[in-house]
Amino acid sequence: MTQLIVLPHVENCPEGAVIEAEEGKSICENLLANGIELDHACEMSCACTTCHVIVREGFTSLDAAEEIEEDLLDKAWGLEPNSRLGCQALVGSTPLVVEIPKYSINMAKEGHRK
């Protein structure tokens, strides 16, 4: 198990959290398994940006993002150089500190269906 520190987020994790994350599973899977809600409108299929997280520590330990993830991240609100899609970033043996952005673009949740 690897330590995953979640910085406080007003709605999803007001107090912040320290969890023991399962290696080989995504940041999103680990957060959800520990009761921390993270939008994932495409059911973690790398088709949206709702699970966007900012990796404040441990970013360089993650495998590089694939091109499809990079293309989607360009559309994420509050993009930073150390942004990742939580559904694509797999936890390894290095502890991580993640921040859930204040906003997420979730068209299905906001009623903007095709």
Image (cartoon, helix red, strand yellow):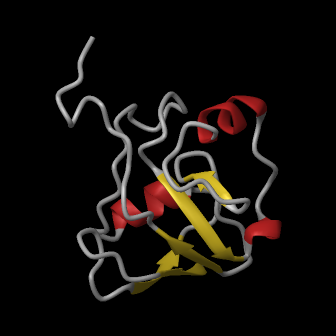
User: From the viewer's perspective, is residue 98 above or below residue 71?
Assistant: below
Q: Residue at x 46, y 38 (%)?
A: 44
Q: Residue at x 66, y 37 (%)?
A: 69
Q: Position of residue 97 (x, y in %)?
A: 59, 79
Whether residue 24 is situated above or below residue 7 in the rendered picture? above
Q: Residue furthest front?
A: 78
Quadrant assignment for the N terminus? bottom right
Q: Is residue 64 left or right of residue 18?
A: right
Query: Which residue is depicted at the point 45% across and 82% down?
Result: 7
Residue extending farthest to the top is 114
Residue 95, image x, y percentages: 67, 81
User: Which quarter of the image is occupied by the C terminus?
Assistant: top left
Tell which of 49 and 29 is nearer to you. Answer: 49
Task: Quadrant for residue 14, please give it.
Answer: bottom left
Name the residue nearer the viewer: 44 or 51: 51
Say how many tags the image has: 0
* 71 with respect to 41 (left or right): right
Query: Does residue 63 appear left or right of residue 39 in this picture?
Result: right
